[in-house]
Image: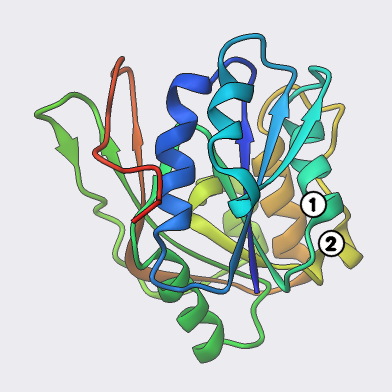
Amino acid sequence: QINCLSTVIFNYGHYIKEAIGSALQQTYKEIEVIVVDDGSTDNSSETLAIYGNRIKTVFQANQGLPSARNAGIAIATGDYLLFLDADDILLPNACLDLLQGFHEHPDCGVIFGNSERVYSEKTTRKPHFKEVRYFTHREILFDNPISVSEALAKREILEKIGCFRPELLQSEDNDFWIRASKAFPIFHIDALVTRYALAYPGKRFKVSDGKN
């Protein structure tokens, strides 16, 4: 089973519906969606309530992104973890494609794919990164290519490297992948798995709430 941990960064309620919908609509169905609300004061709690028992929710006082991700990890039960930020969406075959990467490379601790960047309603940039190969610890350390929402990690890596470091105010995901790459091989697949917006306000994606 995959645990999809979606984190409501403080007051990101206007994005989270699209993120959750994309997780619930995955073609791979053995997925548990966990959403952590990091002390939001907007409409996030009302938005989460509409999903009922289709998702697990954690509400905590505002402690920052690393602590929020760790709170989700604490209740996760699956063998794989995917960290979906509130302002990202998964493409329908994302989990299936990433799991296939593990079937082909069972020695790995992390498999990651590609992201599509959305700059405006009419402007997107497809990823140019096409290399299908292993990445060394040195490569991850000096030029990390992994965006957090495009990677699937085996739960067992937490036994060796621990969770996210709460004391880091930024680049906590970069730190996580660096430590993971020291403990396990990391492999990149040529599959588009995530879409996210850059400097593009308002509605970005046409994704339902996952009811259909």
Question: Tag 2: residue type?
Answer: Leu
The quarter holding residue 7 reads top right
Q: Are marks 2 and 1 in contact (CB under 8 Å)?
A: yes
Residue 155 point in image, percent of width and height: 76, 68
Disc number placed over residue 156 in the picture, else none: none
Q: Is residue 39 above or below residue 187?
A: above
Q: Residue at x 77, y 55 (%)?
A: 179
Question: Tag 1: residue type?
Answer: Ile
Residue under numbered circle 2:
158
Residue under numbered circle 1:
73
Q: Residue at x 35, y 68 (%)?
A: 93
Q: Residue at x 49, y 32 (%)?
A: 16
Left/right of residue 110 with respect to residue 117 in the rendered view: right
Q: Is residue 153 above or below residue 74?
A: below
Which quadrant, please, contains the N terminus? bottom right
Q: Residues within 10 Å of mark 2 (few under 14, many from 20)?
A: some
Left/right of residue 141 with respect to residue 22 in the rendered view: right
Instruction: Look at discs 2 and 1 and give the one toward the viewer.
Output: 1
Going from N to C along the chain, the mark reached first, 2 or 1, is 1
**Secondary structure at numbered mark 2:** helix
Asked whether 85 or 189 is in front, the reply is: 85
Asked whether 134 or 17 is in front, the reply is: 17
Which quadrant, please, contains the C terminus? bottom left
Residue 72 point in image, percent of width and height: 77, 46
The quarter holding residue 81 reads bottom right
Instruction: Give the residue furthest to the left.
Output: 122
Residue 97 point in image, percent of width and height: 41, 74
Q: Is residue 192 above or below residue 202?
A: below
Mark-to-mark CA distance, 2 and 1: 9 Å
